[in-house]
Image (cartoon, rainbow, N blue to C red):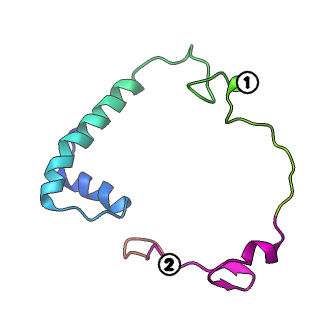
Amino acid sequence: MALEEKDVRYVAELAHLEITPEEVQKFLPQLDSILQHMQKLNELDTSQVEPMAQVTYPAAANPSLRSDQPHKTFEQEEALANAPDQSAGCFRVPRVIEKSEHEPN
């Protein structure tokens, strides 16, 4: 299935990106190529391949998979002590994602 311009615009919309018509033309073959490659990968027989937690290390040797150890945590007052804005015992942050007309209520 070949991609169309509307598909590129849809992906951009999902990522909350505004792209120009020139960028649509630029990204269309790139996205199509990526999806064609993924289709080739989906055709591979991986039934004999063991699942892996990490590709670079065996799970036991991977330094990012450390044991879960309890440690001292901050009390709420201590965590909020340097907060530039707080409300009701929580950090207050500015809104960064606005609801679009395409999202359900």
The residues bearing labels 2 and 1 have C-alpha atoms spaced at a distance of 41 Å
| Among numbered discs 2 and 1, the one appearing first in the sequence | 1
Residue that carries the numbered disc 2 in the rendered image: 95
In this view, 27 is above or below 77: above
View extreme (front): residue? 82
Classify residue 19 by image quadrant: bottom left
Q: Secondary structure at mark 1?
A: helix
Residue that carries the numbered disc 1 in the rendered image: 60
In this view, 24 is above or below 33: below
Amino acid type, callout 2: Arg
Front in this rendered view, residue 28 or 7: 28
Tell me what residue is drawn at x 13 percent, y 60 percent. Answer: 21
Give the extent of the magenta segment: 74-98
Classify residue 1 by image quadrant: top left
Front in this rendered view, residue 51 or 67: 67
Amino acid type, callout 1: Ala
View extreme (top): residue? 48
Q: Secondary structure at mark 2?
A: loop
